[in-house]
Amino acid sequence: MIQFIPTDKKGAPGSARTDADGKYALMSTKGDAGVPPGEYKVVISRILGTDGKEIPADASPFSTGGKETLPPFYSKMEDTILTATVPGASPSTIDFPLTGQGGAMGGAMGGIR
């Protein structure tokens, strides 16, 4: 799961679930595709079930006993080191290489206003 939280507190946050390749398409909390241009804190979370497998999209990670597998500097809003500048042009791609985690996570945002 990836979340974009506006740093100016005026814009609408957005979120998306990544696919198997780490790609995502943000949706605002208002249901619009993308997020408005601006500066964002970024939170990336990877919660796995007690069996170590990915939790289905329709299941709550909290009710299934899921466990966060990424460090707080990626997965906690108050600790994240990730930021993004969303440009005015659309569509845009913003990648987040998660170093030390065995790979990279990339993504493409569509419908940025």
Image (tube, rainbow, N blue to C red):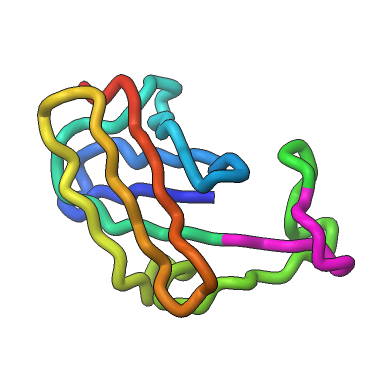
- Residue 59 screen position, x and y as percent: 79, 44
Judged left or right of residue 100, residue 10 is: left
Q: Which residue occupies 28% across, 38% down?
A: 93
Circle count: 0
9 vs 104, nearest the viewer? 104
Rendered residue at 54%/50% (across/down): 1
Question: Which residue is found at the position 82% from the left and 57% from the top?
Answer: 63
Based on the picture, tell me whether residue 10 belongs to the magenta stretch: no
Task: Please identify the quarter of the rendering in which residue 15 is found.
Answer: top left
Q: Nearer the viewer, residue 49 or 92?
A: 92
Residue 43 percent coordinates (x, y): 41, 59
Residue 52, image x and y in percent?
81, 67
Q: Residue at x 81, y 59 (%)?
A: 53
Q: Classify 26 as above or below 8.
A: above
Q: Residue furthest right?
A: 51
Q: Name the residue furthest left.
A: 88
Please tell me which residue lies in front, 95 or 43: 95
Q: Which residues are magenta?
A: 46-55
**Res 107 quadrant in image:** top left
Above or below, 70 against 8 in this view is: below
Task: Pinpoint residue 20: horizontal percent, then vertical percent.
Answer: 62, 44
Left or right of 72? Residue 28 is: left
Q: Which quarter of the figure is the C terminus placed in? A: top left
In magenta segment, residue 51:
yes
Prevailing secondary structure class for the magenta stretch in the rendered image: loop
Image position of 93 with respect to 4: above or below? above
Q: Is residue 79 left or right of residue 89?
A: right
